[in-house]
Amino acid sequence: MTVQESRYTAFVSYRRLPKDTGWAEWLVGALSDFETPEALRRRGTPKKIGRLFRDEGDLAASGDLSGELKAALWDSDYLIVVCSPETPKSNWVRAEIALFRHWGRADRILALLIEGAPEESYPELLRQYRMVGEGRDTVMELIVPAGADVTPRQNKTEQELKDLARDRILSALLGCSFAELRQSLEAERRSETVVAYFHDVVRRRGIPEGVGALTEEQVLHREYSYRFEVRAGRVESVQRVDSHGILREDGEGIAQWDVMYRSSGAVESVDRRNRHGGVKVRESYSRDGRTVDFLREDDTAVAQAGFVGGMGLARKLVADLKERRAGIVRHRLDYDERGYVVRRRYARDAYNTPAQDAMGNYGEGYEVDSRGLVTRMWFLDAQDGHAIQRNGVAERRDEFDAAGWLIRWIYLDALGQPALCSDGYSAVEQSFDEFGNKLKDICFDTEGRPTLSTENFAIWTGKYNAHGNMIESASWGVDGSPTLREQRHALWIADYDDRGNQTRIGYLGFDRRPVPYKSWYATSTAKYDEGDDLIEERYFDVEGRPTLSEFGYACLKQGYDARGNVAELEYFGVDDKPILSKEGFARLTQTYDERGNRIEQVCYGTDGVLTVGKGGFARWVAKYDERGNRIEESYFAADGTPTAGREGVACAKSIFDDRGNPLEQAYFGVDGRPVTRKEGYARHVHKYDMYGNVAEQAYFGVDGGPVLRNNEFARMTASHDVHGNIVEQAYFGVDRTPVLCKAGYAKRKDSYDERGNRIEQAHFGVDGAPILANDGYAVFRQKYDERGNAIEDNCFGVDGEPILSKTGDARRTHSLDGRGNPVEHRCFGVDGAPILCKENWAILRERYDERGNMIEQSCYGVDGDLIVCKYGYATCTKRYDDRGNLVGQEFFGTDGSLMNSDDGFAKVTQSFDERDNWVEGAYFGVDGALVVAKGGYARIKNKYDARGNKVEHSVFGVDDAPILCENGYATLKSKYDARNHDVEHLYFGVDGEPVLSKYGYFKRVNRYDELGSEVEATFFGVEGEPVERVGGYCRAVREYDATGLLLKTRYLNFKEEEVFPEEDHLVWKTESR
């Protein structure tokens, strides 16, 4: 086509509504900025499409177009109509379409569908139909106008939809086919794109920059590399790929970073995507680059966790912290003269209000080398100073070699001296092979000597296959001898498929024979679909036989939706038949919205029928606000009716502030009316301070009035220091006056050291005066070692003087070994002299094995000599199986010989099934023979159902024959409902026949309300007849108030008359155990 200067290539028509206008503006910009690929220009296609006309007025009621608009429309080659459900209502759009058609240009009308179905969004003049089919099967089919569709689709991102729409419309305007245009664009992109690989990435004013260029040979032998795509001198995309070129996600679930630029060349945004292309986080930079906001793909804010784990915090703590979100939605950035970030301050809103991460840090500080690699890192406090971490670490320093490999890092304290991190070392040195795969880690203490970490290795080594996949890792001690990791293995091995997916993991002992990982399986296998998504996992024991994992299944199968979200999970047992997982279902289906929020879960049993899982529901449904906050969740039974979930509510609704803090949660019953949850309230409200710390919590009943939470307090207030630590907490009743909490005080004041360790806790009564709390002291003070471990406790009374606490001592000291295990405790009185605590020891010493299991405990008196403690022994030794289950204990006296403990035995052995359920225990005397223990038996045997509920409990005598225990039975059998409530107990004698228990009945039947509270117990004899048990009643009923709190227990005889036993023999939940 030929475009003349005086004409418009297209006239853009749309209804003047915010969404429609936004899409019209985008379309004009996208078309105007487009440059035709060189291949098409050589055929005579113009470089630019020419001028576009966007109608910006409103049509008067008369329906006439102005002369200016008619002229523009007449002078346009094409008419593009932006279509939404509101478009057919526009007189203006309708008039423009009618006039264009009147001029004989109907074939030059294009449509851009932005919302809704074609039938409802296309104006009538654009809708044409044709008859399809024959005879009675003939149907009328809509002929979709030429143009494009940007309505959301599961397998496409918004940017991909925009690119497709732009190119479809452009192909019509340029007079070429869509396929020709797309092929030309791809060819041009390939010809202009420079690809390079690096082993690390830094940022310069937000733009990714590679560190450590890799050769093609190195890339082929590495687990992952960073693939940079650079076009016209700009980094457009960075992908984390393996040696096969397949996207692999990092620990945050990111596999690709796509960079968008401003016209000035500065970064505008960086989309962090998962390997399926979904945007997990969008970094949106200000024009000067000094702030970066964290957004979802639809540009709503998403909170970040902050930088946790970089200062040697304990691994378990780091894992917990990473699950939290601290309300950080923005970073304020300072750069050095080269453009590298040297300060990063957290903010919780667009007003730059300071924010803290989960550890109370306000930001991060860095020193970087000439390559942008961070060589020194520390956290910032509220005043921009160093924030000392709870483990005593103030900063971390990293060393890199000439190629940019990290070869050493060390943790330092506030004085710049080496400090031990929570994992037991101060420094680590690393070495690599020629491809950059890590071969060895060596851990060092503060003196620079090799040391064991808390994972029980001083040296770690790795081996790799030809593709850079790790196939073996091993642990070694300081002396170079093999060690067992804390998961109880010495070697880890793995196999991979030809695409680099991990297909097998095994755990081996010192002899390279399989050993169980933790307490479950020795080997796991995996399968993947064509998209490299995990679709099956199986678990095997040391003999290679199928075994149950810690989650209660031997095989897991997964299915995915178009966005890569896990949409289905199925669980199977060792026989490959469906099995209930520990969550109480055999199959789970999940549905997600377009943002990736989970909006539905449905639970199925082994028979494929809907079932109620341990969560108390068969189906769960959630709703979210525009910021991604979950504002409603509802629970349904298998029949589709609302049901009370685990917390006793059928529906929970939440309100959030603009920072993502929950302001209010309200709970509703199956009838949609407010309901009281188990803790005694129907609604609770939160208030926050300027830093996002919870400053007040208040609880309300179904009538809207204040109520006590757990019969304790109706309102709690808290104030925090600049690090987010609670420094004062107070409790109030329904009348807003101070009340004592269950711990025995109305107010608590806390003080902390510079590392955030609590060093003092003071208690006050309702009158504001110091008070002795339930633990027996008014003030509690602690001291810590350099690693943040508590090493001394001190208790004081209301007068500030030392006082004996509930445990019988005024001061207690603790000593720990290098791995953080407490190895000695000492007790002192108010005068500072050694004292026997209430457990009858002044000194307690403990020893641990290499796995961290306590294997010996010894008690000493004030004179330092062995002493028999409260529990009847001076020394106790313990043994464990390969899975860490306690399988044996022995008790010794002060002379080192075996002695019977207070429970009547000197030795006990225990065994466990493959799911770590206790299946047998045996008790022995000092002579090694079976002995009847305190409960009236010498041996116990237990059986469990598939969900881990104990269904049979049997006891035996010293001759291994059944014996009646002190509660009058030899075997107890139990049954459970779908929610794992014990609903029936039956008692049997030594001959296996029904027998009356000590309490006078053979069978007990329990009934529960929808909240899971036991409301009735009924008792029956051996013939199935109702019986009056000990206490004179055959039925017991518990009554609760609207808040779920127990009001009364009524005991009824055969005549339904209430009786009043001298003693409440009905020990709910424990009598039958």
Image (cartoon, rainbow, N blue to C red):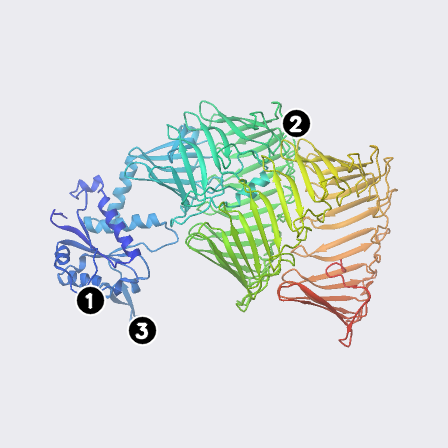
**Residue in the picture at 25% in, 49% down:** 178
Dot 2 and dot 1 residues touching (CB under 8 Å): no
Badge 2 is on which residue?
A: 481
**Are there few (<14), some (14-19), or many (20+) residues within 10 Å of tag 1?**
few
- The Cα atoms of the two marked residues, 1 and 3, are separated by 45 Å
Q: Nearer the viewer, mark 2 or mark 1?
A: 1
Badge 3 is on which residue?
A: 136
Whether residue 757 is visible: yes
Q: Nearer the viewer, mark 2 or mark 3?
A: 2
Q: Nearer the viewer, mark 1 or mark 3?
A: 1
Kind of residue at badge 1:
Ala
- Callout 1 secondary element: loop
**Quick one: 850 or 1057, which is closer to the camera?**
1057
For residue 976, side relative to residue 419 (left or right): right
Instruction: Answer with mark 1 or mark 3, whichever residue precedes in sequence.
Output: 1
**With respect to residue 97, does 533 lie above or below?**
above
Whether residue 848 is visible: no
**Quick one: 487 or 557, which is closer to the camera?**
487
Percent of width and height locating residue 656: 47, 54
Kind of residue at badge 2:
Ser
- Callout 2 secondary element: loop
Percent of width and height locating residue 813: 72, 35
Percent of width and height locating residue 9: 17, 50
- The Cα atoms of the two marked residues, 2 and 3, are separated by 83 Å
Point out the residue furthest to the bottom here: 1055
Badge 1 is on which residue?
A: 61
Kind of residue at badge 3:
Arg
**Are there few (<14), some (14-19), or many (20+) residues within 10 Å of tag 3?**
few
For residue 549, side relative to residue 953 (left or right): left
Indicate the quadrant where residue 1030 lies. bottom right
